[in-house]
Image (cartoon, rainbow, N blue to C red):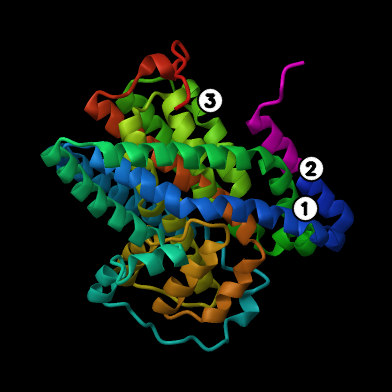
Amino acid sequence: MKKMSMTAQILVATVLGVILGIVFGERMQSVRLVGDIFLRLIQMNIVLLVLGHVVEAVGSINPRSLGRLGIKTFTIFITSSLCAASWGVLMGTVFQPGSGTMLGDMAGSEVVSATVMSVTDTILGFISPNILGSMAQGTIVHVILFGILFGIAAGAVAAKQEDRRFLDLVTLFNKTIIKLVSGIMKIAPLGICALLASTVGKLGIGIIIPLAKYLAVYGMATLIFLIAWLVLVSIRCGVSFPRLVRNVSGISMMALATTSSAVTLPTTLRDSEEKIGISRRLCQFVLPLGMSLNCNGAAMHMAITIITISQIYGVQYGPGQIVYIIVLATMSSMANAVVPGAGLVSLSIVIPAMGLPLESIALFASVDWFVGMLRTILNVDADVFTAMLLSKKEGELDKRVFYGQTILEPA
């Protein structure tokens, strides 16, 4: 009998978790521990996984290539995130998800004054004063920046001394971490089932109804944006649209089920190389960076949520403020935490900045899990699409692998 694939197992676990939550309700809270253990087992490796891959990737790139590749990578990151935030604002403005809802009677609540973070504070927020402290706190942006600088230094030393022993040790370390994470992922279906069962059991399926319009608009916005990405990549890379959808399905399913870019990263790294045909060099450079710095889903989520809350409270913004929302959502998404539930933390930064009550965030806490599914799938898929575009440009996209004509051996 053919063994069920991990994607199929996760799909079954997702459906089963929802059913168990509906049937047994609050009693499913007892299994939450299983899901939390799974997430923590994954998360305890993430800092080392990201740091190791960035150091290896940057240290192995010629300094001239690093400058050119880095500019191209960050240009796509910023452009796509700005487009995602703009699309979120447009969809929220056109479909008015916050108007006429049952939450509209809160419009008389006091609205706090806007507090805008200075450009200086924003820039300094990306630089760690203590990298060990940042690693302990799981601040991925700080870890990535340190990894880039450390990788440049390690590559320079290796080139000057003609000694790659340190970088070879980093490579071996990365393989060990991947092996550890791959072992943990074997319990993914069980952990995901437990998380969904406890979440649905606590909130109840009816919790979606009051915010159904918000979820529908955000879901539609995400779907259209994903289709636009797929069309763009299939045309620019000269590959089949249906085959592209098929090849990213495993990554998308993992992102959808776990609601975490960090938890999905091992799957993204593996499938991008072994199913899509992106070179290992670009996978290891672009994907860990994109996990934190290319959050299309987070940018769209923050933008559309700001618009929705402003409609609930009867707040109107002018053109200048709309532009600020787009930039604010994009900047905040670049520092977005890569764990489930991080969306609410990000909202606590952007909501007061736009003159909206901080307590309004609680309105969306009950559906954060469902929103997180949409947010994460766009975050992760956009990273893969960025890597594909760069692979095509660099001549490192293996179409034989993409079409299943060559099977790569796992690293």
Please name the residue that numbered disc 3 is placed on. 246
Quick one: which residue is furthest to the bottom in this view? 110
Question: Could you tell which of marks 3 and 2 lies nearer the N-terminus?
Answer: 2
What crowding class fits label 1: few (fewer than 14 Cα within 10 Å), some (14-19), or many (20 or more)?
many
Question: Could you tell which of marks 2 and 1 lies nearer the N-terminus?
Answer: 2
Nearer-the-camera pick, 128 or 273: 128
Please name the residue that numbered disc 1 is placed on. 197
Please name the residue that numbered disc 2 is placed on. 16
Tell me where the magenta segment starts and ends, as one range: 1-15
Question: Could you tell which of marks 3 and 1 lies nearer the N-terminus?
Answer: 1
Can residue 222 be seen by looking at this rendering? yes
Is the stretch drawn in magenta largely helix, strand or loop?
A: helix
Quarter containing the C terminus: top left
Q: Helix, strand or loop at disc 3?
A: helix
What crowding class fits label 2: few (fewer than 14 Cα within 10 Å), some (14-19), or many (20 or more)?
some
Under mark 3, the amino acid is Arg
Under mark 1, the amino acid is Ala
Residue at the image position 47 percent from the left and 15 percent from the top: 407
Q: Are marks 2 and 1 in contact (CB under 8 Å)?
A: yes
Q: Are marks 3 and 1 in contact (CB under 8 Å)?
A: no
